[in-house]
Image: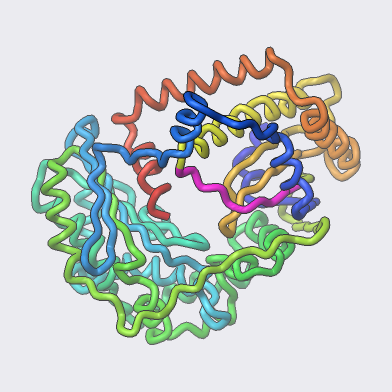
């Protein structure tokens, strides 16, 4: 049974959220005695504290208007380029009256811009020979909205138009009243249902608890029906003007091209963009730590599974130094071993869980989290499933892992690192992920 896609979309029947208790446990797990370091040890310490170097093949620049760009040649793409516009503007920036507004802005980008009327835009995207549309080439989340194109580089005009289109999406979207009304009708209908599916509706039930009633808890990109229906051409355009601006944007270009020519295209198309004056201050939202343990039971008649999940939140850890990277490798090994143990629970006779997963990962609202999740055998199997999953988590916490488990996890990690390294110039998605992790 393949639960993974459904399970990882926040659908939960029983969600337990803990505050800082496990954060202390995590730190204690790596506690060591303080020792005076000299000579080679001091040099090693300085090395691990050093900032990780940027990929020397990436051209990084910033225009006078504040827009940052990243360009990397990759000849293995064979006549193709991946172009991306990253806006540090998502649904968390919406006011109460604007709930859901970031999404129609994204969708209006495909209804025409100053230099690309809708028919011309459709014609250009058709020439690219790819599936396209607001749900294919763009995505809006809490903290950002991203547009992406895959364009040929062997036809100079088509290649150049890719940068031109991104610049139009960055600052020149037309907000045609008829097109906006059509988008509002579609989005209001989705919001009226509480989301497109059971996973969305369960997410709306659990986020206020999980995110401690912060701005993130009430700014799902889908918005609310009443807010969406109240959107006007002027109000949507105001959100666009406030937050789609070059000092909050980045351009990423990876592909089979002369990087200097790609850089020139960026300068030509984006240097003329202007920030609003006065620029609206960008609020920085956080999630206040939960005191104690919060419990949420969420149900939806269209969700067919019974799940249990524990989420232990931590402040976000950003990998910037060699020491940070080493810690991230330790976490990778920890996750690998613990998940192997959890998976084994699904293979024993009369398994207490049908699917399980546990480990540390990125989270919402500038947080990281340890999460343990299990799909259990219906409501009647909830207690047995919870006990089995948490027994594995607590066993790891109390006794750690065996040498054999660690060595096996190391071999898997080394194989994955080797594979990723060998494919570093063959997979545009990997290159984009490396670059975007530095931009967002």
The residue positioned 74% from the left and 46% from the top of the image is 24
Q: Position of residue 83 (x, y in %)?
A: 27, 50
Q: Is residue 15 magenta?
A: no
Which residue is painted at 79% across and 61% down in the image?
Answer: 291
Q: Residue furthest left?
A: 156
Question: Left or right: 327 with respect to 394?
Answer: left
On the image, which quarter does residue 374 sit in? top right
Left or right placement of residue 257 versus residue 308 in this view: left
Q: Is residue 253 visible?
A: yes
Q: Nearer the viewer, residue 28 or 313?
A: 28
Please name whichever residue, 33 or 174, is drawn nearer the observer in this view of the structure: 33
Q: Is 279 rendered above or below residue 186?
A: below
The segment highlighted magenta reads 310-320
Q: Position of residue 79 (x, y in %)?
A: 17, 37
Residue visible at 78% across and 33% down?
Answer: 397
Residue 411, by quadrant, is top right
**Depicted 81 relative to depicted 18: above or below:** above
Pick the quarter of the image with the C terminus: bottom left
Q: Residue at x 64, y 31 (%)?
A: 35
Which residue occupies the foreground of this view, 391 or 397?
397
Estimate the x, y position of residue 119 in percent, counting from the top left: 22, 66
Residue 43 in picture, x, y percent from top left: 45, 29
The relative height of residue 255 versus residue 313 in the rendered view (above or below) is above
Q: Quick check: can you spot residue 228?
A: no
Residue 320 position by quadrant: top left
- Quadrant holding the N terminus: top right
């Amino acid at each position: 049974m393949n639960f993974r896609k459904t399970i990882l979309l926040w659908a939960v029947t029983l969600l337990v959220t803990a505050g800082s208790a496990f954060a202390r446990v995590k730190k204690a797990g790596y506690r060591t005695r303080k020792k005076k370091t000299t000579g080679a040890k001091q040099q090693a310490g300085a090395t691990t504290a050093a900032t990780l170097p940027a990929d020397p093949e990436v051209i990084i620049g910033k225009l006078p208007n504040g827009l940052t760009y990243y360009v990397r040649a990759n000849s293995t793409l064979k006549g193709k380029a991946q172009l991306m516009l990253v806006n540090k503007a998502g649904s968390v920036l919406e006011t109460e009256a604007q709930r859901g507004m970031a999404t129609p802005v994204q969708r209006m980008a495909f209804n025409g811009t100053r230099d690309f009327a809708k028919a011309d835009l459709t014609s250009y995207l058709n020439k690219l020979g790819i599936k396209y549309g607001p749900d294919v080439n763009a995505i809006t989340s809490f903290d950002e909205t991203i547009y992406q194109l895959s364009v040929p580089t062997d036809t100079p005009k088509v290649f150049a138009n890719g940068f031109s289109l991104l610049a139009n999406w960055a600052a020149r979207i037309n907000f045609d009243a008829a097109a906006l009304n059509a988008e509002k009708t579609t989005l209001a209908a989705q919001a009226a249902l509480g989301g497109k599916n059971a996973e969305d509706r369960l997410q709306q039930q659990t986020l206020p608890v999980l995110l401690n009633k912060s701005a993130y808890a009430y700014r799902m990109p889908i918005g609310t029906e009443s807010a969406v229906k109240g959107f006007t051409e002027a109000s949507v355009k105001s959100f666009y003007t406030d937050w789609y601006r070059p000092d909050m944007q980045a351009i990423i270009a990876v592909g089979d091209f002369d990087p200097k020519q790609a850089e020139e295209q960026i300068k030509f198309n984006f240097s003329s963009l202007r920030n609003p004056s006065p620029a609206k201050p960008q609020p920085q939202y956080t999630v206040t730590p939960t005191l104690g343990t919060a419990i949420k039971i969420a149900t939806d008649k269209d969700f067919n599974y019974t799940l249990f999940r524990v989420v232990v939140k931590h402040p976000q850890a950003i990998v910037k130094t060699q020491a940070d990277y080493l810690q991230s490798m330790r976490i990778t090994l920890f996750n690998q071993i613990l998940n192997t143990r959890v998976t084994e629970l699904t293979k024993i006779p009369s398994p207490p869980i049908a699917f399980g997963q546990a480990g540390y990962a990125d989270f919402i609202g500038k947080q990281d989290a340890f999460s343990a999740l299990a799909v259990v055998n219906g409501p009647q199997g909830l207690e047995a499933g919870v006990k089995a999953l948490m027994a594995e988590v607590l066993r790891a916490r109390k006794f750690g892992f065996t040498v054999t488990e660690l060595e096996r996890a190391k071999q898997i990690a080394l194989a994955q690192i080797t594979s990723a390294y060998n494919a570093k110039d063959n997979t545009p998605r990997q290159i984009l992920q490396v670059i975007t992790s530095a931009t967002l």
